[in-house]
Amino acid sequence: MFIDSHCHIDFPDFSEGVVPVLANMRAAQVSHALCVSVNLENFPRVLALAKAHENLFASVGVHPDHDQGREPSVEELVGLSAHPRVVAIGETGLDYYRLQREEVDWQRARFRTHIRAACAAGKPLIIHTRNAAADTLAIMAEEGAAATGGVMHCFTENWAVAEAALAMGFYISFSGIVTFKSAKDLKEVARRVPLERLLIETDSPYLAPVPHRGKRNEPAYVRHVAEEIAALKGVALEEVAAASSHNFFALFAAAGQG
């Protein structure tokens, strides 16, 4: 069985509802999925999915690229994360893709808020980083993110960044990008990350893997990510499935209790 460790099936892209999404998951042997929050306004919808379906879990957080809506506080994130179906804080991190360097202070402050909340709540972090790896790692170190751990989601950085995150106790999660022919450097990182520190995800509705590239992504397609990683590592698909599923429940310990 496979687990999608990061998806957004609460998004309008899934306007038909989650019933067909769950059916497709079953058909593809995807047993569970983590629905990840990107803002506080829509968090109730994320939590409702997790409450309604025993194989779905939720996180709470505000995406670093979200510049509208309510700003989170440590206290609010800790309070919302106390629900047993909420297994992580995030996604959070830094995304400088659309920003100038002088515009990033608010992102850094928000990232620190999430790390402090995760440490206070005792729940792991889901970290997003784009064009900001050095600052992301620096803030993780400064705020003691190693104390709570977490995952570098939809990883696209080089081995040096992966190694630094692994040294802080974080897992590395690969999305459909690893199946793209152009992702040669990322494929090499996937070869090097130990199976015991690896997760798989879709980040759906985005980044559909080959052979579905260009279509709406969904949790059922996480199987293709696992197939690519198995091929890169030269191991059986079942080994990747077992390791990544074990890692999911080891990291998101609350998922095993809820």
Image: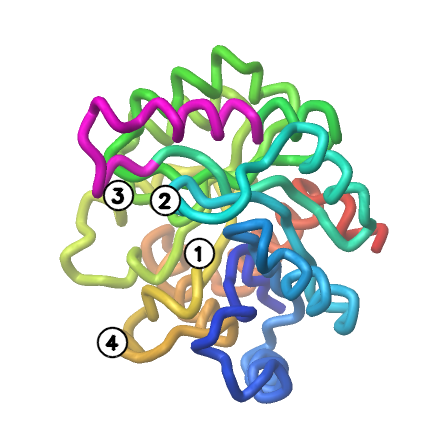
Is 108 within the magenta?
yes
Q: CA distance from mark 3 to mark 4?
A: 24 Å
Q: Amino acid at mark 2?
A: Asp
Q: Which residue is mark 2?
A: 65
Query: Which is nearer the N-term, disc 2 or disc 1?
Result: 2
Region rendered in magenta: 95-114
Mark 2, other Cα within 10 Å: few <14 / some 14–19 / many ≥20: some
Q: Amino acid at mark 1?
A: Val
When the figure is inspected, residue 92 is found, relative to residue 54, above or below; the finding is above
Q: Amino acid at mark 3?
A: Glu
Q: CA distance from mark 4 to mark 2?
A: 23 Å
Q: CA distance from mark 2 to mark 3?
A: 28 Å
Q: In terms of secondary structure, where does tag 4 sit? A: loop
Query: Which is nearer the N-term, disc 3 or disc 4?
Result: 3
Q: Which residue is mark 4?
A: 214
* Camera-nearest label, 4 or 2: 2
Q: Which residue is mark 3?
A: 188
Q: Amino acid at mark 4?
A: Gly
Q: Which residue is mark 1?
A: 235
- Direction from residue 102 to residue 207 in the image, left or right: right
Please tell me which residue is depicted at 22% across the width and 36% down the height of the picture.
Answer: 99
Comparing 69 with 47, the one in front is 69
Residue 197 visible in the shown view: no
